[in-house]
Amino acid sequence: MESKEGDGRNEAAESDEGRAHQRARRSLCRARRVVVKIGSSAFTDAARPSASDQSTAGAVFDRFAAMTRDLLTPAGSQSSKRRSKELVLVSSGAIALGLEHLGMTRRPGSMPALQAAAATGQGLLMQRYGEAFGAHGLKVAQVLLTHADLANRARANNAREALTKLLHLRVTPIINENDAVAVDEIRFGDNDELAAMVASLIGADLLILLSDVDGLLDLTNRRVPFVAQVDERTEALIRETNSSVGRGGMKSKLESARRATLAGTPVVIASSRMPNVLERVLAGHDVGTLLPALGEPVRARKHWIAYTLRPRGAATVDAGAALAIVRDRRSVLCVGVTGVRGSFVEGELISILAADGTEIARGLARLSISEATRLAGVHTEKSEPLVHRDDLVVLATTS
């Protein structure tokens, strides 16, 4: 009997997940503002056309131009108004094209060489986008960003306004990291991270991460169609990437997808080589791996705090303080702090760690590290907050 009851519970859970999957797929049909990340693998053939088939280079760009055209409504058209979309492309490919143009066969390890390849390839990338989209009567615009642009609230707001205006003018933004000037401190981890940040920045209804695989694969190499939430079981399916041109992989995609879903944006990871992949995803077809938006979205400012800024230090708190922070959403008080490290001043982001080193929250410090060190663990009539709850984002969950 116990076995049957257990089987019944498993079947019920699978049935519930199946219904959730169907609902989430149907909801994609209503997505209007969509961010599409195109990985380097999509341009591998474009960067290395054979001598006998020069059309290969333009075919990839033309395919994305055609898919974009099919999703955009011509000005004044009423018949296809239901299908009207706003597309923002976060496109890799500049370094791959630059490497080919410079005669390099592998991605170099030095920053100057990468910057040279990016500077060389970025113009080629936009030229090919411009030609392909222009052939379909579409306009494109180049937008280059660094992490520092989005970490600064004023510059991030400017970027949002520029992107919004381009969309209103029916111009497709082609976004890439400004690799020619980016160094480790101001660069994104990869374009998956950049795409997730852009999706949050412009309030996208959907993020599509395109790669060279059909989605997340299980241990038997079968596509996983639905992931309700990224957890340890999901992460156990991650395989290492051996790409010679790109920096991302499934680990990056899942982490970027997790961040986007917390901001209220569903994510689909799919193959860039699938015919009409964008239209099929937006029609609600069972394509790729879908990760639905999670609960109430984290507000824009707090999402910016947690997932755009980078910690400049950390504070470890005792068990009582950790419980108050995670369960009761209290401020981080100096009296509960057992240690601090790093180099931060007032207003900079710090990580909040439990006694075992687990990161439970992130927030903006109201004290410098010297002040925090002096006040850590000190009992006073009114304990000074190291991080006020208004500037705090809890990352852990209560059991």
Image: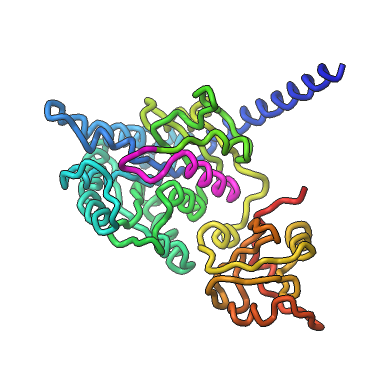
Q: Is residue 144 left or right of residue 396?
A: left
Q: Splitting the image into 4 quarters, where does residue 143 fall?
A: bottom left
Q: Residue at x 67, y 29 (%)?
A: 17
* Quarter of the N terminus within the rendering: top right
Where 272 falls versus 134 (above or below)? Answer: above
Nearer to us in this view, 94 or 175:
94
Nearer to us in this view, 124 or 10:
10
Q: Residue at x 59, y 38 (%)?
A: 292
Q: Position of residue 33 (x, y in %)?
A: 47, 44
Range drawn in magenta: 242-265
Q: Position of residue 332 (x, y in %)?
A: 71, 69
Q: Is residue 64 left or right of residue 375?
A: left
Where 138 falls versus 148 (above or below)? Answer: above
Is residue 249 part of the magenta span, yes or no? yes
The number of discs equals 0
Q: Position of residue 174 (x, y in %)?
A: 33, 48
Determine the residue located farthest toward the right in the rendered image. 1
